Image (spheres, rainbow, N blue to C red):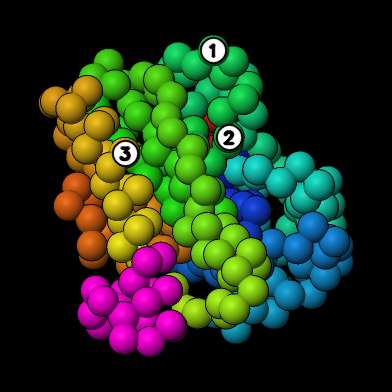
Amino acid sequence: MVEAGSEQIVLIDAGNTNTVFGVYRGDELVEHLRLSTDRERTADEYGALLLPLFARLGLDLAATDAMMISSVVPPLNSTMETLARDYLHTSAVFIEPGLPTGLPIRYDNPAEVGADRIVNSVAALELYGAPVVVVDFGTATTFDVINANGEYIGGVIAPGIGISAEALFSRASRLYRVDVRKPTTLVGSNTSNAMQSGIYYGYIGLVDGILARLLKEFTDLQSVVATGGLATLIAEGSKYIREVNPMLTLVGLKLIYDRHRAS
């Protein structure tokens, strides 16, 4: 058996919009890459993309000892299994019911909880203590709550900022796509700035409105931590988000991998 401190572990967070690949050596995250999620991309195409990208960074993925995956895109699962077998010469372990995570799930149907939400919660509990709320800005924006006993008790799911903006662009015939960014002024003096203001401040209102209610219910909350592609942008305007950790999911995957290995 390879010593835990010298293992090379590939961790994958397969989301609806992006897929993040991280490589750990022992307990150190040595590199990570983000690719757009493409359900039609084959294992050979992923191999052709990833191997040279990581090779340029001095990493040989063929020397991988283990691969663990958090996936909310079921059509990708068999592709990732083939990628692990044919290119990394190892087997893929998925975050799924029965895998030891160390996080009690107090949900009506635990199997309904997305793998990414479990992984983020494991990392937040380890890094920030309990109770804690994780806000993940992805295709959907999720608010996950871990109570004072260190148990996952559920959360809130809202449309992501990208989905919300796209609905505006597609349903209003005279409006056009704009970048999602913090506007220079609250009151826009042209259509583009007015839309950016509405999208940005409107979404912060959604996020802070939900967090304000959670803070009333969990008065001893230790932290609110944000992750995901637009976490930094929204956190800048939020009254309640105090921590931003873009690597939260990879940290959680590594923690779960260690617990799985130990078991």
Residue 219 screen position, x and y as percent: 14, 25
The residues bearing labels 2 and 1 have C-alpha atoms spaced at a distance of 13 Å
- In the image, residue 192 sits, relative to residue 209, either above or below, namely below
Q: Nearer the viewer, mark 3 or mark 2?
A: 3
Label 3: element kind: helix
Q: Which residue is rendered at x = 37% and y = 66% of the image?
A: 198
In the image, is residue 155 above or below residue 128?
above
Residue type (three-letter) at the residue carrying disc 1: Asp
Q: Tell me the SS state at disc 2.
A: loop
Q: Which contiguous range is marked in magenta?
A: 181-199
Question: Dot 1: within a 10 Å radius of its alpha carbon, few (fewer than 14), some, or many (20 or more) residues?
Answer: few
Give left or right: position of 25 versus 75: left
Tell me the mark number nearer the camera, choosing from 2 and 1: 1
Q: Position of residue 254 (x, y in %)?
A: 47, 44
Q: Residue at (31%, 86%) from the top-left corner? A: 189
Examine the rendered structure and indicate whether residue 33 appears above or below residue 65. below
User: Which is nearer the N-term, disc 1 or disc 3?
Assistant: 1
Mark 2 and mark 1 lie on one chain; the one further toward the N terminus is: 1
The residue wearing badge 2 is: 114
Q: Which residue is mark 1?
A: 108
Q: Is residue 211 left or right of residue 231?
A: left
Q: Amino acid at mark 2?
A: Gly
Q: Is residue 250 visible?
A: no
Q: CA distance from mark 3 to mark 2?
A: 20 Å
Q: Quadrant of the N terminus?
A: top right
The residue beneath circle 3 is 210
Residue 191 sits in quarter: bottom left
